[in-house]
Image (spheres, helix red, strand yellow):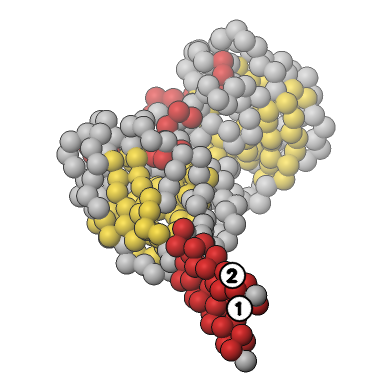
Amino acid sequence: MRSMYRWMYCAALVAAVVASSASKVSAAELLAPGDLIIAIDVDPPYVDSNYPGPENPGNLLDNDPTTKYLNFGKTGSGFIVTPLSGSSTVQSFQLNTANDAEARDPASFELYGTNSAISSADNSEGNGEPWTLISAGDLFLPSARVSAGSVISFANVSAYTSYKMLFPTVKDAINANSMQLGDAAFFESNDGSGPNVLSPGDAVIAVDNILSLESEHFSFQGADKVIDGTLDKYLNFGEENSGFIVEPGVGASIVTSFQITTAFDAEARDPASWALYGTNDPVTSTDNSRGDAEAWTLIDAGSIVLPTDRDTLGPIVNVSNSTAYSAYRMVFPTVKDANDANSMQIAEVQFNGRILAIPEPTTAMLSLIGLSGLVLRRRRA
């Protein structure tokens, strides 16, 4: 009977030590280089169609290819035109290149027609009316500037009072900041002959059917810079409501505070407020997305006053939290001076808290386990 009691005592002792060790959570820095981290902006998608006043879509119709229509919406941008000449059955078109930047030339097209009154607004998606696809395909505009491209022909037997032309792609989207054209001409013939259906004075508006997301950064200033251990910065042109999602490599953790290091310039871009969310879902959101592919729980939020000095560690910001999460989303709703800032930026960030992983057995624990084993062996002897 005594041997049973001793066995139970030793087993209980070992279990208590193991349980005590397993229940301990260590206060630590939670983020490190190599952790999964992506840039986000939680603002809703928006129509990116916009153009400089002198480079409006009316320039497509002025029969002067030295003037141009430029749309910063780039891919997916285009125009809607309602010819003064009335209903027509367009079967071909021709486009002229603009004066510079070949990368901005359209590389594909979609042509639609409608007989409904145009209710779409300038710089909208251009979906205010029912549209019928007439033709679509690739474009091969010449490298020469202010030059006419080949006539594009297609089969069409339907007459329409308005047309929508979209350009889903440009020649070099990486190096282009916009889409541009010098002139456009539509023809009822299938070979570009005969009068141009379009003329100066036709009602024409700019459109862009691809919704854009706010989050955007240079490749060398991505979110990974905030945990790389250097003063290289993360800059997001989404500005307000931009931030990042990070999945600490240490595993599930309880964030209890954080610190931010300012970037080397432009104090106006410093975050002025924060909101921290947590999730235990696998992170499937992508870089420069809204970061909403997971179910997020708001942990805590507040204001932050970062130092005026550049490349300087900011104050410890305490986070009211007792729940463990495997990933975190940090959003910066405001910056110090939104009027003067064109982005949000920080150099480094560190989350502090407790790691929930079971630690390696301590020397004391191993000693107790060994002692219990020795007691049992002596009793058996």
Direction from residue 306 to residue 92 in the image, left or right: right
As shown in the figure, which amino acid type bears the numbered disc 2? Gly
Direction from residue 292 to residue 379 in the image, left or right: right
As shown in the figure, which amino acid type bears the numbered disc 1? Arg
Q: Is residue 271 visible?
A: yes
Q: In the figure, residue 193 lies in which quadrant? A: top right
Dot placed on the residue nearer the N-terminal end, 2 or 1: 2
x then y, percent, for residue 300: 34, 64
Question: Badge 2, how many Cα within 10 Å: few under 14, some, many 20+?
Answer: some
Quadrant occupied by the N terminus: bottom right
x then y, percent, for residue 344: 34, 41
Task: Identify whether 201 is placed above or below 377.
Answer: above
Q: Residue at x 36, y 67 (%)?
A: 321
Task: Identify whether 328 is placed above or below 23.
Answer: above
Q: Residue at x 58, y 33 (%)?
A: 75
Q: Where does label 2 land, which residue?
A: 373
Q: In the figure, residue 377 lies in which quadrant? A: bottom right
Q: Where does label 1 land, which residue?
A: 379
Task: Identify whether 375 is placed above or below 131.
Answer: below
Hey, which residue is sitting farthest left in the picture?
308
Q: Is residue 301 visible?
A: no
Tell me how far mark 2 sits from mark 1, CA to CA. Answer: 10 Å
Quadrant occupied by the C terminus: bottom right
Q: In the figure, residue 5 lies in which quadrant? A: bottom right
Direction from residue 58 to residue 303 in the image, left or right: left
State how many labels appear.
2
x then y, percent, for residue 80: 57, 38
Q: Considering depth in this image, is 168 or 81 the residue closer to the camera? A: 168
Q: Residue at x 55, y 11 (%)?
A: 146
Q: Residue at x 39, y 40 (%)?
A: 226
Hey, which residue is sitting farthest bottom in the picture?
1
